[in-house]
Amino acid sequence: MGRTMEWAAASNHLRGIPRKTVFMLVGAFAKVVANVLNTTSVHNADTLVRLVQSRPPGVPLLLSVIICLRKLDDPVMWGFNGFPTTNSELGRWVLTAEDICFKNPVYSYVFRTGKCIPITRGGGIYQEHMNEALERLGNGEWLHTFPEGKVCQTDAPIRRLKWGTASLITRSSVPPIVLPIIHQGFEEKAPVPLCNKKINIVVGEPINFDLPNMRQVAITMSRNLSLPKTGWMTTRCGLDEAAQMCLYTSLSEKIQAAMESLRIFGKNLLKENSKIHAS
């Protein structure tokens, strides 16, 4: 199966005018929702802005991971003050559910020009559009993912993550910067768009991975396991199917732990701010 409307996702499609238009309109919408209709506070925003605008030399990639609480998380969360929301060149590529965002040709075109990559839920980590996501990372672009693979959730402990994000980290030609982000406020039931809510966004610090060591540990662990075969090819690093499963599990657990710590920190931060405002 070929890639859905890949031509519309090209930066030079119609001289980039459709992409710039989508980012200007959606960015303006996000600004209004985040700053006019609601109150948005961001902890550690400087780290996110710095990595988006000027990543360190030799580490040209950024892969941000977040839990999706409702379908408007992205783009509304990028509407906070000081963020280059309407800049189509700096804007993120994001993995999006094909059954939600690509229902018909019109939706497909708009989301494609908005730098969205369609993902078939249940299609596995080696589906064709995951290869496109890897290409975007390899080109030094910002890729945004939702590792739980679900939408419309409550602000609850982070569930076990899918392996998609972990596979992108280990398969990327250059190890990406992995930045966890958590938000609160989106989970409250409300009409669309959100109104009169306090949105709290917490940006963490990049997660460090010792990938060479983690690969060796995965190889050792896999020798003593009997896992079902799904037909994965051996990677260029020499990981067979069982070793890949062990590695993806380890990476996912580390991301899950970092995000859960960030979630708890965010809730405590909200409580402290509420006490300050109440006093």
Image: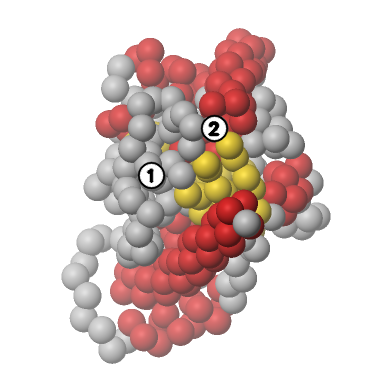
Which residue lies under the disc numbered 1?
A: 187
Seen in the picture, residue 278 relative to 189 is either above or below; the reply is below
Q: Secondary structure at mark 2?
A: loop
Residue at mark 2: 38
* Element on which disc 1 rests: loop
The quarter of the displayed image where residue 164 is located: bottom left
Q: Residue at x 62, y 30 (%)?
A: 35
Residue 172: which quarter of the image? bottom right
Between 10 and 197, the residue placed more toward the observer is 197
Q: Amino acid at mark 2?
A: Asn
Label ID, residue 159: none
Specify the farthest residue to the front: 279
For the residue pair 40 and 136, the one nearer the viewer reads as: 40
The x and y percentages for residue 37 are 54, 26
Is residue 80 visible to us here? Answer: yes
Is residue 139 positioned above or below 250 on the image? above
Image quadrant where one finds the C terminus: bottom right
Residue that appears at 59% across and 76% down: 210
Q: Residue 189, how many percent across, how many down?
A: 33, 37
- Which is more foreground, mark 1 or mark 2? 2
Q: How is the image coloured?
A: secondary structure
Residue at x 46%, y 84% (from the top left corner): 217
Near-viewer residue (31 or 140): 31
Q: Does label 1 or label 2 sit earlier along the sequence?
A: 2
